[in-house]
Image: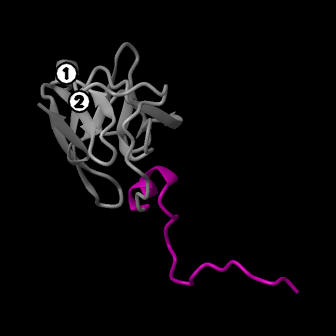
Amino acid sequence: MPLFAITKPSNHKSAPLPFAFRLDLLPLKTKKRSKSDSGEEQSDRENTIICAYCSHAITSPESRTAIAGTHEHAFFNPAGVIYEIACFRAAPGVYTEGFATGEFTWFSGYLWQIALCKVCRAHLGWFYTGKEDYFYGLIRNRLIEKQ
């Protein structure tokens, strides 16, 4: 007889959320760092957009871009969580995780991957790739514009 059993409630009718949508539910428990991954001190450059959790430089205002006619968008995911995102051509402070997928994409013709902060690994948005184009859709309330 097994020591434990995994059971599914009898009223369970839908599959659990994909892993990509569960990242936001995890608590963030990391120390703030003043150095980049390479160990060099981060500069106090003006007009830098930083991670709201650890202050790591993510992108710059110069990297803003309009997708589908505008720089900012608001969407909700299949779980009903609303995201306000801003679009950027470059975001050297993030890395992508997982395989690119078109499932529940907010931009027709684009596949997406999760984008995480390179320092604290907080979920900051998504990296979108199209046939001839790419951009980052970053969650506005997880970024701070340092002026």
The residue where tag 1 is placed is 65
Whether residue 6 is in magenta: the answer is yes
User: In which quadrant is the C terminus drawn?
Assistant: top left
In the rendered image, residue 80, in percent from the top left (x then y), is placed at 29, 60
Residue 13: % across, % down: 50, 73
**Residue drawn at the location 45% of the way across and 44% of the way down:** 121
As helix, strand or loop, the secondary structure at mark 1 comes to loop
* Residue positioned most to the right: 1
Q: Quadrant of the N terminus?
A: bottom right
Q: Residue at x 43, y 45 (%)?
A: 120
The answer to whether mark 1 and mark 2 are in CB contact below 8 A is yes
Give, as a single range, the part of the protein colored magenta.
1-26
* Residue at the spot 43% in from the left edge and 58% down from the top edge: 29
User: Crowdedness of circle 1 by 10 Å Cα count: few (<14), some, many (20+)?
Assistant: some
- Residue 107 in view in this figure: no
Residue 129 shows which numbered tag?
A: none
For image coordinates 52% across by 77% down, the residue present is 12
- Name above or below for residue 95 compared with residue 90: below
| First-in-chain label (1 vs 2) | 1
**Coordinates of residue 3 in the picture (x, y in percent):** 81, 84
**Badge 2 is on which residue?**
87
Residue type, label 2 = Cys
Residue 30 in magenta?
no
Q: How many marks?
A: 2
Q: Tell me how far mark 1 sits from mark 2, CA to CA.
A: 6 Å
Q: Is residue 103 visible?
A: yes
Type of amino acid at the residue the image marks with label 1: Thr
> Considering the numbered disc 2 on the image, is that residue within a helix, a strand or a loop?
strand
Q: Main secondary structure of the magenta part?
A: loop
Residue 77 at x, y percent in the picture = 32, 52
* Mark 2 Cα-neighbour bin, 10 Å: few <14, some 14–19, many ≥20: many
